[in-house]
Image (spheres, rainbow, N blue to C red):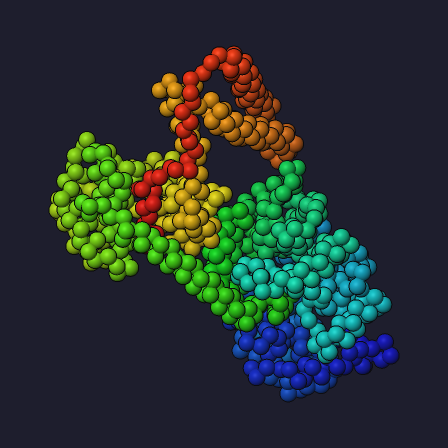
């Protein structure tokens, strides 16, 4: 509705009028096509603004009438609290109505609805004036097109950006130009029309944010490896803008947080210093703080998890206050979101339940596909879409890639299963059991557990009918040992064995077990589980994870992953790791299982086994025959201990330093002194241990020199490495058995 400098009766941009005349929807509205039902207020705002533009320049009488009919048919949606409100709707829409009345347009709006809107606008304006915060002043400037004569037009020019716009908003910039005739504003508007033709976007430029959203989607969907060069090019450009201090990054907390997180996680050296301008108190005084923008809070929370330096206390504090806001169900930060409410609520739930360090890649990919919105609509002062924000083709590629990856994992799992099945078929004992050969009579329960697990594996894959029958005969002959209290119980036997029995029944196996024995075992299992739930201790949770193969559907599989070790295993247990992989298809679990099958020596039992051998030699009094071997083992063990102690000492020092620096923790002097004393005592203990180890080393060296001067008997060398360590039971696995 900007007039030409040459004539007040001529529009400055007549091509925009032509666009309005040609792009009215069939229902009489303007705005996004195929809009969501909850975006009716956005359609009302766009339609009324279009009607006023046509009316002002005296064109499109038919389009105006159809637009008025649309407003009349849908004006009741303003009173629907479920409808999503564009930013500034409470100010802009009543102002448009008043302007329409000045143009002589008879709007089909009931007086009660109109009066209610005007009252709400006055209340909002009054509250803002009373607060008089920087966030309110920025918000006033952002909705300038609705402020009319109450706006301080010269003051708002401090928000003008280098590209000539205000807030990268064509609507705001046009309103300011209409009043002040600012040349930079005009240059911005002309550049927008040159790029987009007759249509004007809601926000421009949006390039950096939209491209970062695309990269984030590709990574979350697990298909970023298909676009390595394109992603690298975008990130290089973004990093260059970051170094240059680009306004499009640093004036928007959402874009700044997303750029920081993605750049840092992709190896770029970016500082967390910009987040000082988005501390809790400063964010509350910003535009998005005033709007209570939950999307900005989500991105700030995600960025706060990308800590790589020990002195980034700003990110620690940022994590605390953003997480607290997101956790509050009635949080005022839920008042505005740039997406439809149900998608935002799901995003909040997801980011709280699965922080960066706890995300499992394939599960993240699957969740992202399930909640991916191919027609994602963003809402600012009006709604908009971008192909960089969502795409049907991207989702299709992600689903295909995920299925291909799953098929590869399934094939690898089958190969593992075949390897194990071949071992089972070849290693059944003469009595029909599996497990340790020449077992002790009090280890019958262990043999029953191994045998039943082996039977289930063979039955599931339809092989070894003869071995299955012999195994069932062994179980029938020895099942009574379960009631023998003298028998030794393997860890988790009370949970795992009943679960295997239930799984056998599902496979149609008729187990030769009396009902009384079975019922007793199930009752004991339920009692054990109930006691564990009541205690709810960390020990119980770790135990549950350790016996995952017997927990079935009652297990919290995602939480179990916190016990995963660097080698990919859980508790260095192939059985536990296989059970978790069966559920979650975790690549690290699969890698561990493959390494175990390739080489048994890769199981990290070396230190314990060698120390047991040294202990046995010393207790038997023959350690003097193996001085060199024992010295080598002890040197290796000592080196590992010192490394662990050094890491612990460094961590203690960092913890103490962080405690003293971080003001957010607000530690009292008493708490601080207590912590210092505790840390000091532990450091003294560590130094004492180190000195003692050095003294022992010196004593042993002196003793060795003395002994070398004396004649020694012939040495009977024995290999005490674990190269020949062979535990037939350790080869047992329930891989492939879905419990």
Q: Quadrant of the N terminus?
A: bottom right
Query: Can you give x and y, in whole percent of width and height, for residue 374 in the image?
Result: 53, 69
Q: Nearer the viewer, residue 711 or 339?
A: 711
Residue 526's image quarter?
Answer: top left
Residue most extreme to the right = 6
Q: Is residue 191 visible?
A: yes
Q: Is residue 659 visible?
A: no
Q: From the top left corner, tell me how far across and down residue 522 is, in percent.
A: 21, 44
Residue 319 horizontal/vertical position (percent): 59, 44
Q: How many marks?
A: 0
Asked if residue 129 lies left or right of residue 432, the reply is right
The residue lying toward the viewer, choosing from 36 and 627, is 627
Nearest the camera: 339 or 678? 678
In the image, farthest residue toward the bottom = 62
Question: Please, is residue 613 above or below residue 476 in the view?
Answer: above
Q: Is residue 661 above or below residue 182?
A: above
528 and 257: which is toward the camera: 528
Residue name at image x 77 percent, y 64 percent:
165
* 435 relative to 121, above or below: above
List x then y, in percent, for residue 487. Answer: 20, 33
Residue at point 47%, 59% (across, down): 367
Give the residue drawn at x 15%, y 49%: 473
In this rendering, position of residue 395 left or right of residue 23:
left
Q: Residue at x 73, y 54 (%)?
A: 242
């Amino acid at each position: 509705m900007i007039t030409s400098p040459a004539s007040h009766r001529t529009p400055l941009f007549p091509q925009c009028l032509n666009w309005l005349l040609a792009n009215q929807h069939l229902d009489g509205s303007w705005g996004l096509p195929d809009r969501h039902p909850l975006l009716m207020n956005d359609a009302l705002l766009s339609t009324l603004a279009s009607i006023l533009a046509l009316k002002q320049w005296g064109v499109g009488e038919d389009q105006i009438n159809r637009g008025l009919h649309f407003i009349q048919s849908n004006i009741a949606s303003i009173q629907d609290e479920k409808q999503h409100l564009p930013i500034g709707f409470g100010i802009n829409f009543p102002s448009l109505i008043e302007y329409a009345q000045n143009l002589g347009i008879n709007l089909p709006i009931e007086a009660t609805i109109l009066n209610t809107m005007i009252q709400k606008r006055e209340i909002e304006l009054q509250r803002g004036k009373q607060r008089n915060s920087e966030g309110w002043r920025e918000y006033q400037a952002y909705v300038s097109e609705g402020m009319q004569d109450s706006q301080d037009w010269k003051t708002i020019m401090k928000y003008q950006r280098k590209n000539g716009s205000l807030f990268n908003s064509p609507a705001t910039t046009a309103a300011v130009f209409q009043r002040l005739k600012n040349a930079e504003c005009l240059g911005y508007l002309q550049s927008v029309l040159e790029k987009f033709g007759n249509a004007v976007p809601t926000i421009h430029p949006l390039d950096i944010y939209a491209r970062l959203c695309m990269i984030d989607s590709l990574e979350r969907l697990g298909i970023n490896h298909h676009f390595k060069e394109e992603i690298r090019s975008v990130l290089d450009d973004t990093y260059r803008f970051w170094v240059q201090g680009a306004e499009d990054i640093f004036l928007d907390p959402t874009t700044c947080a997303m750029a920081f997180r993605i750049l840092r996680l992709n190896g770029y050296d970016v500082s967390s210093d910009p987040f000082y301008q988005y501390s809790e108190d400063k964010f509350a005084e910003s535009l998005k703080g005033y709007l209570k923008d939950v999307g900005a809070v989500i991105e700030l929370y995600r960025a706060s998890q990308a800590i790589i330096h020990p002195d980034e206390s700003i990110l620690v504090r940022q994590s605390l206050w953003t997480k607290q806001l997101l956790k509050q169900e009635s949080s005022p930060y839920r008042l505005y979101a740039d997406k439809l409410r149900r998608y935002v609520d799901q995003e909040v739930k997801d980011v709280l339940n699965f922080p960066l360090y706890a995300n499992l890649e394939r599960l993240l990919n699957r969740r992202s596909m399930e909640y991916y919105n191919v027609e994602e609509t963003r809402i600012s002062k009006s709604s908009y879409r971008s192909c960089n924000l969502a795409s049907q083709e991207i989702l299709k590629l992600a689903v295909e890639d995920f299925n291909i990856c799953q098929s590869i994992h399934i094939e690898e799992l089958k190969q593992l299963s075949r390897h194990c099945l071949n071992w089972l078929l070849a290693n059944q004992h003469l009595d029909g059991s599996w497990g340790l050969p020449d077992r002790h009579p009090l280890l019958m329960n262990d043999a029953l557990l191994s045998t039943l697990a082996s039977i289930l594996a063979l039955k599931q894959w339809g092989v070894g009918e003869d071995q299955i029958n012999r195994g069932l005969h062994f179980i029938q002959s020895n099942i009574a040992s379960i009631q023998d209290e003298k028998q030794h119980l393997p860890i988790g036997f009370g949970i795992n064995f009943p679960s295997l029995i239930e799984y056998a029944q599902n496979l149609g196996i008729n187990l030769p077990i009396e009902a009384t024995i079975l019922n007793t075992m199930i009752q004991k299992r339920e009692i054990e589980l109930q006691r564990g739930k009541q205690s709810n201790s960390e020990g119980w949770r770790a135990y549950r994870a350790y016996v995952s193969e017997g927990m079935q559907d009652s297990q919290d599989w995602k939480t179990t992953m916190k016990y995963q070790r660097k080698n990919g295993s859980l508790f260095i247990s192939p059985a536990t790791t296989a059970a978790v992989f069966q559920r979650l298809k975790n690549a690290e679990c699969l890698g561990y299982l493959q390494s175990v099958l390739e080489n048994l020596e890769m199981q990290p039992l070396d230190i314990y086994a060698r120390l047991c051998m040294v202990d046995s030699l010393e207790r038997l009094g023959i350690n003097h025959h193996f001085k060199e071997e024992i010295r080598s083992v002890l040197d290796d063990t000592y080196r590992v201990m010192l490394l662990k102690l050094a890491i612990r000492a460094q961590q203690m020092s960092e913890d103490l330093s962080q405690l003293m620096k971080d003001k957010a923790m607000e530690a009292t002097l008493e708490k601080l002194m207590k912590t210092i004393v505790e840390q000091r005592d532990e450091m003294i203990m560590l130094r004492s241990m180190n000195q003692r180890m050095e003294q022992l080393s010196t004593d042993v060296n002196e003793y060795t020199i003395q002994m070398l001067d004396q004649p020694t008997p012939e040495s009977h060398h024995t290999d005490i490495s674990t190269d020949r360590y062979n535990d037939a039971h350790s080869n047992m696995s329930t891989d492939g058995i879905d419990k």
